[in-house]
């Protein structure tokens, strides 16, 4: 991606980590190890960052649910000033390791719950997330986070695989006062498959 190979270490794959979990981890927060995989939406986001390197260079950026750190690393390598967070501390340990492994500037990695974001208001010119709107219960906290953290004139990029559960989200965002538009729909090659992924841009009305 972007003319280079990215190396990603992880403890194990999603299924293996899931099998190791005990019942205490399967509470209402469902701390499932989704962070251990690279998802098609993140690959398209990474490609989009590379295509728009001049746009993000030097800008304050927020990576929501960074997982193994791929998109945060790409942006940092392009010169962006990246704060990347995940809910799971293990994910951030591997993300930090992966940035070191790839020899890129370390983003600011932090453990955070998007329901309770510890972020300055209007701090980020760009916010992105890959495949985070797959459950309806995530909509309200994420829209609150976007509204709080996005700088005036800023942009949010969300990658999402084409799936039924996400279809109402974009109309709901419009009703919440956001301006969403689909930037591109592309097939993403991953592990012998080519799922179709949408990339959306979300903005707040100016003025």
Image: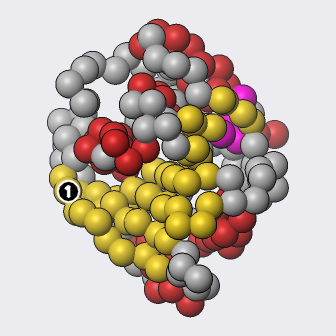
Q: Say which residue label 1 marks.
A: 186
Range shown magenta: 85-89
- Mark count: 1
Question: Can residue 107 be seen in this snapshot?
Answer: yes
Which residue: 55% across, 54% down? 125
Estimate the x, y position of residue 83 in percent, counting from the top left.
63, 38
| 53 relative position to 23: left or right | left
Q: Looking at the picture, does residue 187 appear above or below residue 206?
A: above
Visual colour scheme: secondary structure
Q: Judging from the image, what secondary structure is the residue with disc 1 in?
A: strand
Question: Can residue 134 be seen in this snapshot?
Answer: no
Q: Is residue 201 magenta?
A: no
Estimate the x, y position of residue 164 in percent, counting from the top left.
38, 74
Which residue: 42% across, 25% down? 77
Q: Residue furthest bottom?
A: 175
Quarter occupied by the C terminus:
bottom right
| 2 relative position to 180: left or right | left
Q: Is residue 88 magenta?
A: yes
Estimate the x, y position of residue 158 in percent, counting from the top left.
44, 59
Estimate the x, y position of residue 35 in percent, counting from the top left.
55, 36
Q: Looking at the picture, does residue 132 appear above or below residue 164?
A: above
Quarter occupied by the N terminus:
top left
Q: Looking at the picture, does residue 38 appear above or below residue 151?
A: above
Graded by Cα atoms within 10 Å as few (under 14), some (14 to 19) or many (20 or more), the crowding at tag 1 reads some
Observer-nearest residue: 192 or 147?
Answer: 147
| 91 relative position to 179: left or right | right
Which residue: 18% across, 53% down? 187
């Amino acid at each position: 991606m972007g003319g280079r190979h990215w190396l990603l270490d992880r403890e194990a794959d999603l299924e293996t980590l899931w099998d190791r979990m005990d019942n205490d981890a399967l509470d209402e927060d469902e701390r499932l190890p989704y962070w251990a995989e690279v998802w098609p939406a993140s690959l398209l986001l990474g490609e989009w960052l590379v295509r728009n390197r001049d746009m993000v260079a030097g800008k304050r950026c927020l990576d929501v649910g960074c997982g193994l750190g791929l998109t945060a690393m790409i942006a940092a390598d392009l010169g962006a000033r990246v704060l990347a967070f995940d809910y799971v501390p293990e994910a951030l340990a591997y993300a930090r390791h992966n940035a070191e492994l790839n020899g890129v500037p370390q983003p600011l990695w932090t453990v955070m719950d998007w329901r309770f974001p510890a972020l300055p208001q209007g701090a980020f010119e760009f916010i992105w997330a890959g495949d985070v709107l797959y459950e309806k219960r995530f909509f309200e906290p994420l829209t609150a986070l976007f509204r709080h953290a996005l700088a005036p004139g800023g942009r949010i990029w969300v990658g999402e695989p084409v799936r039924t559960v996400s279809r109402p989200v974009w109309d709901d965002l419009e009703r919440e006062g956001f301006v969403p538009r689909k930037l591109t729909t592309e097939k993403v090659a991953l592990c012998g498959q080519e799922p179709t992924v949408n990339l959306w841009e979300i903005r707040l009305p100016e003025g």
